[in-house]
Image (spheres, rainbow, N blue to C red):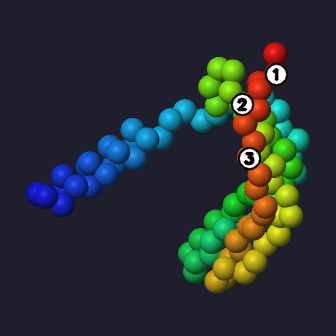
Amino acid sequence: MKTILAVIMMATTTIAIAGPEPTVLMSEVKTVGYLASASPNALVPGEAWEGVKLVRLEPGKCEKIVHSNLHFVPAGDAEKPLFDEARTIVTCPT
């Protein structure tokens, strides 16, 4: 019973922390597909992006996200994307 209660509490906490996705105001990105995971029964594709996104976090507050130097490294039978990320709080465009 304690285990079930603990699992429910963790799930509730996770749901409470997760907020709405930020609104993307501008996106100048190149999306690249890759093999995220591989098992004998399933291949799972993934997507990584490189470029610039401008997102609205809340009214009047935006964030510029830049992904650069995108490359992939082996991860078992799959691949893992690596990139440099820079985030800057900016004034939202009018």
Query: What residue is drawn where x is 75% and y is 67%?
Result: 82
Local SS, label 1:
loop
Q: Which mark is residue 82?
A: none
Q: Earlier in the sequence, mark 2 or mark 3?
A: 2
Lower position in the chain sequence, tag 1 or tag 3: 3
Real-space Cα separation, disc 2 to disc 3, in angstroms: 10 Å
Which residue is under mark 3? Answer: 87
Residue drawn at the location 75% of the way across and 77% of the way down: 73
| Circle 1 Cα neighbour tier, 10 Å, few/some/many (<14 / 14–19 / ≥20) | few
Q: CA–CA distance between discs 1 and 2? A: 9 Å
Q: Earlier in the sequence, mark 1 or mark 2?
A: 2
Q: Quadrant of the C terminus?
A: top right
Residue under circle 1? 93
**Image height check: is 31 above or below 58?**
below
Q: Mark 1 and 2 residues: CB-CB less than 8 Å, in contact?
A: yes
Q: How many discs mark residues in the rendered view?
A: 3
Please say if 57 is above or below 80. Answer: above
Q: Is residue 65 left or right of residue 22?
A: right
Q: Amino acid at mark 3?
A: Arg
- The N terminus is located in which quarter? bottom left
Q: Position of residue 41 (x, y in %)?
A: 56, 75
What's under tag 1, amino acid-wise? Pro
Three-letter residue code for mark 2: Cys
Question: Does residue 45 sit above or below 74 in this rendering?
Answer: above
Q: Circle 2 is placed at which residue position?
A: 62
Q: What residue occupies the far bottom of the structure in this picture? A: 76
